[in-house]
C-alpha cells in the first residue's frame, strides 16, 4: 500500500475501490509492528480499530452517510482522555488508570468517524523536551534511532514520521508539538490558546497547554482543527468565537510582510547549519514576493526563565491532585495519611516531575512569590505587548523551530538546563497564547537529520497562517 500523506488521497483510494478501511487499518498495524524498536506506542487498540474499520466499510456498502473523517487513522498522546481507555501521562502515578470520559477534542473527532489506533508515549506529564522521562522508556527518532525525537509529544511525531498513522494528536505547553515535529520532519501545529478545548487534557500548565496536531499536510491540519475547535461548556477558557472553515480557506495567499527576530539568528546557541537553513528559508520567501525584514527583540533571553517559573508554579498546583487518595498509585508502605501522601507521590512521580513540582512550590512560597512568580508574569505581559507591536506591522514572525538538530539519547538527562534552553524559540507562542506552526525545512547536512522552521501569527490568525503555510 502506498504511503499516504494527505487524507484526501485516502478518501480517493477508498471511493475508487482500491482499498477498504480495513486494509488501511491493517497496514498501519503492520507498520506499528515493524517499528516496535522505536517505542512509539504504549498501547495499541488493534481489535477496536479493526472493528471500527469493518463497521465503516459495511456502512459505506449500505450507502449510509459517514463522517468527514471516515477512513482517517490517528493516534493520541498519553495525556488525552478517551472514555474507558487507559491514560497515564507516562507516569507510574496513573499506572492502570482508565478515563471515565473522553476529551472534547477526542469526542468531536470520533463523532466524525475517525479511527484511533492507540496512545503514544510521552515525557511524564508532558514535562520534557526529549521523550526520555516516560515510565515506558524513551522513544527513538525514526531518522536515527540513536537520537531523541523531541518532546514531550515525541512519540506522536514519530508515529506520523514512521507511517504508523496518518495524523497524531499531541499537546503543546512550550513547544511540545512543534519541537518534535521539527526533529522528525513533519508538520506540527499549535493553535491560539482557547481555540481547542482543554477538557480531557491532563494538565501541566493550565494557562499554556493546548492540544495540537502532527501531520504530513496542511490540509489535514486544517481539517482536524476545524472539527476540534470551538466553544465547550466543560472548559471556560475555550473561545466562543466562531470557528472558520479552515479547510476551505487554503487557496492562494497574498504577499505577506514577515518579520524575523534578529537576535534569534545571531544567538550563540544557534547551530551554524540551522542558521544557514533559516537564511535559505527566508530567501525562498523573498523570491516568492514576500517582504522579509529583521526586527529587534530584547526579551529573548528572558523568555525561558519566565516560562519555567510560571509553568512549574502551575504544575505544582495541578499535580497536587495526585495524592494517592482519590485515584492513581497508592503506596503499600504507608501507615498513616501523611505517609500515604508522601510515599505515594515519591514512588509515583519521576525525577523530572519532582524537580518541576519543587521548583514551582519554591517560586510560589512566601517571601519568593514577588521575586519570581510576580516578575515572570510581568515578563509575560511585556512579551505579549512586544509581539503585538510586531504584528501591528507584520503578518507573521518567522524563526527556527529549534536551535539544533535532534541530539543523542541521554545527552541532556544530566543537564536539565540544556534541555530547557532547547525550547528558546518555541515558548514565546505559548507565553503569548499565539498560533504557531513548524514546517519541515530541510536536512542538517552533518547529521542528515530533519530541521524545521516556525511561523507565528496573531491571536486567532490560524486561517491566514495555514493558508500561507500551504502556499510556501
Image: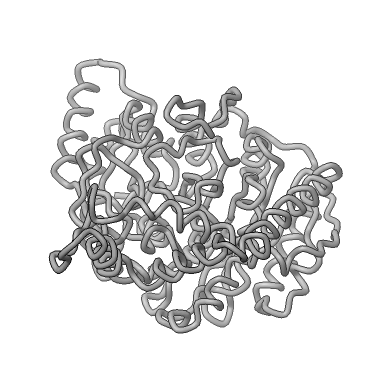
**Residue 15: quarter of image:** top left
Q: So how many labels did they put on this image?
A: 0
Residue 84 seen by the camera: yes
Q: Is residue 398 left or right of residue 355?
A: right
Residue drawn at x 55%, y 37% as measured from the top left: 194
Looking at the image, is 374 positioned above or below residue 225? below
Measured as percent of width and height from the top left, residue 88 is found at 28, 54
Residue 425 seen by the camera: no
Q: Is residue 321 left or right of residue 99?
A: right
Residue drawn at x 40%, y 79% as measured from the top left: 409
Measured as percent of width and height from the top left, residue 286 is found at 81, 55
Measured as percent of width and height from the top left, residue 311 is found at 54, 58
Measured as percent of width and height from the top left, residue 455 is found at 67, 52
Given residues 17 and 342, the one toward you in this image is 342
Residue drawn at x 50%, y 41% as measured from the top left: 221
Looking at the image, is 206 positioned above or below residue 143? above
Given residues 86 and 246, the one toward you in this image is 86
Q: Is residue 221 left or right of residue 155?
A: right
**Residue 308: quarter of image:** bottom right
Looking at the image, is 58 positioned above or below residue 77? above
Q: How is the image coloured?
A: one colour
Residue drawn at x 59%, y 26% as measured from the top left: 244
Amino acid at each position: 500500500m502506498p504511503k499516504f500523506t494527505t487524507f484526501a488521497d485516502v478518501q480517493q483510494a477508498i471511493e475508487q475501490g482500491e482499498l477498504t478501511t480495513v486494509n488501511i487499518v491493517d497496514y498501519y498495524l503492520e507498520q506499528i509492528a515493524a517499528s516496535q524498536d522505536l517505542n512509539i506506542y504504549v498501547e495499541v487498540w488493534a481489535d477496536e480499530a479493526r472493528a471500527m474499520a469493518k463497521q465503516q466499510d459495511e456502512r459505506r456498502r449500505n450507502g449510509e452517510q459517514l463522517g468527514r473523517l471516515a477512513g482517517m487513522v490517528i493516534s493520541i498522546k498519553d495525556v488525552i482522555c478517551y472514555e474507558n481507555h487507559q491514560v497515564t501521562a507516562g507516569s507510574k502515578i496513573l499506572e492502570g488508570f482508565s478515563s471515565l470520559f473522553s476529551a472534547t477534542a477526542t469526542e468531536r473527532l470520533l463523532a466524525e468517524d475517525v479511527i484511533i489506533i492507540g496512545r503514544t508515549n510521552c515525557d511524564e506529564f508532558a514535562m520534557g523536551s526529549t521523550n526520555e522521562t516516560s515510565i515506558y522508556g524513551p522513544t527513538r527518532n525514526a531518522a536515527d534511532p540513536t537520537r531523541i525525537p523531541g518532546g514531550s509529544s515525541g512519540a506522536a511525531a514519530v508515529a506520523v514520521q514512521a507511517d504508523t498513522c496518518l495524523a497524531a494528536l499531541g499537546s503543546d505547553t512550550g513547544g511540545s508539538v512543534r519541537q518534535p515535529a521539527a526533529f522528525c520532519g513533519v508538520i506540527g501545529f499549535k493553535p491560539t490558546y482557547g481555540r481547542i478545548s482543554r477538557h480531557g487534557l491532563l494538565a501541566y500548565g493550565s494557562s499554556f497547554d493546548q492540544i495540537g496536531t502532527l501531520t504530513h499536510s496542511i490540509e489535514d491540519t486544517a481539517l482536524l482543527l476545524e472539527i476540534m475547535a470551538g466553544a465547550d461548556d466543560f472548559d471556560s477558557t475555550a473561545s466562543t468565537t466562531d470557528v472558520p472553515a479552515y479547510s476551505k480557506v487554503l487557496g492562494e495567499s497574498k504577499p505577506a510582510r514577515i518579520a524575523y527576530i534578529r537576535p534569534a539568528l545571531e544567538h550563540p546557541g544557534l547551530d551554524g547549519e540551522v542558521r544557514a537553513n533559516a537564511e535559505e528559508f527566508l530567501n525562498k520567501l523573498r523570491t516568492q514576493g514576500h517582504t522579509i525584514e529583521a526586527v529587534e527583540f530584547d526579551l529573548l533571553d528572558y523568555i525561558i526563565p519566565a516560562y519555567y517559573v510560571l509553568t512549574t508554579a502551575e504544575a505544582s498546583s495541578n499535580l497536587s491532585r495526585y495524592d494517592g487518595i482519590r485515584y492513581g498509585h497508592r503506596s503499600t508502605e504507608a501507615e498513616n495519611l501523611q505517609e500515604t501522601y508522601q510515599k505515594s507521590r515519591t514512588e509515583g512521580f519521576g525525577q523530572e516531575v519532582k524537580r518541576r513540582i519543587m521548583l514551582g512550590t519554591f517560586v510560589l512560597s512566601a517571601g519568593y512569590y514577588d521575586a519570581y512568580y510576580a516578575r515572570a508574569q510581568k515578563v509575560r505581559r511585556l512579551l505579549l505587548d512586544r509581539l503585538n507591536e510586531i504584528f501591528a506591522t507584520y503578518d507573521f514572525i518567522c524563526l527556527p523551530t529549534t536551535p539544533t538538530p535532534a541530539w543523542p539519547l541521554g545527552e541532556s538527562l544530566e543537564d536539565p538546563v540544556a534541555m530547557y534552553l532547547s525550547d528558546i524559540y518555541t515558548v514565546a507562542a505559548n507565553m503569548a497564547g499565539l498560533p504557531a506552526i513548524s514546517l519541515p525545512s530541510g536536512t542538517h547536512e552533518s547529521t542528515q537529520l530533519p530541521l524545521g522552521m516556525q511561523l507565528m501569527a496573531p491571536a486567532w490568525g490560524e486561517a491566514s497562517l495555514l493558508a500561507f503555510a500551504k502556499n510556501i
